[in-house]
Amino acid sequence: MTEAGRLVPETRIRQLEQHARDIRREIVTMVHTAQSGHCGGSLSASDIVAALYFDVMKIDPARPRMPDRDRFVLSKGHACPVLYAALALRGYFPVQELSTLRKNASRLQGHPVSTYLPGLDATSGSLGMGFAQAIGMALEAKMTGAQYRVYSLLGDGELNEGLVWEAASSAAKFGLDNLVAIIDRNNLQNDGKADDIMPMEPIDRKFEAFNWRVLTIDGHDMAAVVQTLESAAKASGKPTCIIARTIKGKGVSFMEDQREWHGKPPSDIEFTRACKEMDDAEPDCTETEGGRR
Amino acid sequence: MNLVPAKIPTRRAIADRMLQSGGQRDDFVVFESDIGYSTYSYLFGDAYPKRYFNMGIAELGTMAAAAGMAAEGRPTVVCGYGVFLTMRALEAVRSFVCYPHLNVKIFSSHGGVTAAIDGVTHQATEDIAFMTTLPGMTVLVPCDSASARAAFDLCLGFVGPAFVRLMRDPLFELYPEGTEFRIGGSHTPRKGKDLTIAGYGDMVFQALEAADRLEQEGIQAEVLDLYSIKPWDQKSLRESIQRTGALLIAENHQRRNGLGYELAAWCMKEGISLPFAQIGLDDTFAESGSYPLTLEKFGMDPASIVSSARKLIAEK
Ligand SMILES: Cc1ncc(C[n+]2csc(CCOP(=O)(O)OP(=O)(O)O)c2C)c(N)n1
Ligand SMILES: [Mg+2]
């Protein structure tokens, strides 16, 4: 049971897990095709992004600028393959377009540019800047009484930026309970273990001290992810921070928890291996009620 | 011109020299903001862990901390990407490094659209404007390994702020080891009599390629490598344009407030009147893509230099 009291049906969970697997496959495929981009942090966030785009967020791919839509700000903009994959699979643009990632004239820029692609709510790629923009979006809703919520995904390394804590202070001051920050706590950043490069723990108590409500979950447990995101979307007077414990590179064994896979594209051989692993991870078709694409 | 393809980018060459120098002198320290595997500063960090400070993803605080240490008299190096060093950390660079004229050396990778693939948030296309505007700042842009290593030695050879723009990807090797470089100096990798193409960094190679093509049309272009942007080599430029009578500036940067603006203002002040044009971003952001295709799309490739050169010569 969740705080909200809704038990997410098992079949729904299985469907969302399937969406997450589809997203992972597209991530690895597009980064392989581009021979450039960030697999690790995209794969660690796949379950969270699948839950947001296929269940939690109030959105309409046919009306990407719908005023009351929920907003998503990918503050760790380098992980845009996960967002591009989710948007395409959700129907914002053709899945085939994913193969244009990082190419000239593509709408899929190396880091997300809001004016380029339907469904992108913010421009990001410079760490800390996305989250700070999310504050403004949530403030706008508070000011006008608009009912949308703002979800922002941050990296744990990103928490090093002072800007994150400026934004966190202001979210509490203005009582932005329409704002949900999700920390992709994969314990890796560019140069090594996040805990070594710049120790940030205790992250939960830091956010609590900044007057946030804090929830900690396993970021790969789809039931927990969906239920917690839903419960976070309830007015409580405080902004909510979800610390999602994740594995960087999740879903491709040789990328899992490896610093090198932060921003490296797979070679042809590695790509074939990754595909084989992802095929093997697919549940037997007869077992899934959600079914495959 | 037959150039040897480079095996390493300038960001790597300067880091290699920094590692080497770390064993020869023990006074300087290195600050990094979690992209040590990209700036290659980790090489120094692995060898001299006590003299290496990885401050996490916190460029503004990193720059201010380096200023604080430099204020104690310690030579400090700060490594990072141009966009973050020259924008997020700009106030620290201006008011707390340059104003007190502290001994901080900034090694700045991903200059211009050499980082094209990562997109605009990672392309430092205004860095030269920001850095050259700061009083007391020395600005260098090496184009190859030898000049990058020399840039390290030049920077660490004086007390005061310096900025070195570096590239993400390897291009070519131009200068033999042992070539002399100096602050305020330049080189002329190609002599010519019909027009002067002045460039720096990667654009030196685009200019050389353009000069090869121009030669086939019977046009002799002189290529000037202004690797020292501030101060820059007025004497060599004056001598060159007096002979050629036309000036084209090629830079991987916004045209506005780049080296071109500086040289144009100087020509006016000196009463030098000649056909003049700029190659660079024309008041626009670039985009993600491959380096050569992005240069082409934004009019900075050899073909664009060639057509611009033709027009200048027609104006003579
Ligand atoms: C302001 C800024 N500084 C540096 C970078 C370069 N950079 C890109 S990703 C990254 C590491 C991010 O680590 P984390 O936030 O933990 O992300 P994840 O592990 O989820 O990929 C760095 C330093 C950047 N994009 N923005
Ligand atoms: Mg991380």
Image (tube, coloured by chain):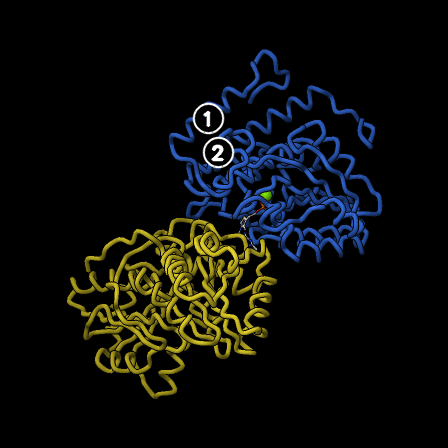
Chain colours: A blue, B yellow
Q: How far from the left and from the top, in percent, is residue B305?
A: 29, 64
Asked which quadrant contains residue B276, the reply is: bottom left
Task: Tell me residue A168's x, y (percent).
Answer: 73, 53
When the figure is inspected, residue A89 is found, relative to residue B17, above or below; the finding is above
Question: In screen coordinates, is A291 left or right of B183?
Answer: right
Q: What residue type is labelled 2?
A: Val
Q: Residue at x 70, y 42 (%)?
A: A69
Q: Can residue A26 be seen in this view?
A: yes
* Amino acid at pointer 1: Cys
- What residue did someone put label 1 on? A275
Asked whether B247 or A160 is in front, the reply is A160
Q: What element carries label 1?
A: helix
Contact check, label 1 and label 2, Cβ < 8 Å: yes
Q: Above or below — where is A7 with respect to A56?
A: above
| Residue B62 percent across, percent down from the top left | 58, 62
Give the side of residue B48 with respect to residue A173, left or right. left
How many marks are shown on the rendered structure? 2
Q: Distance between the residues labelled 1 and 2?
A: 8 Å
Parent chain of label 1: A
Label ID, residue A28 = 2
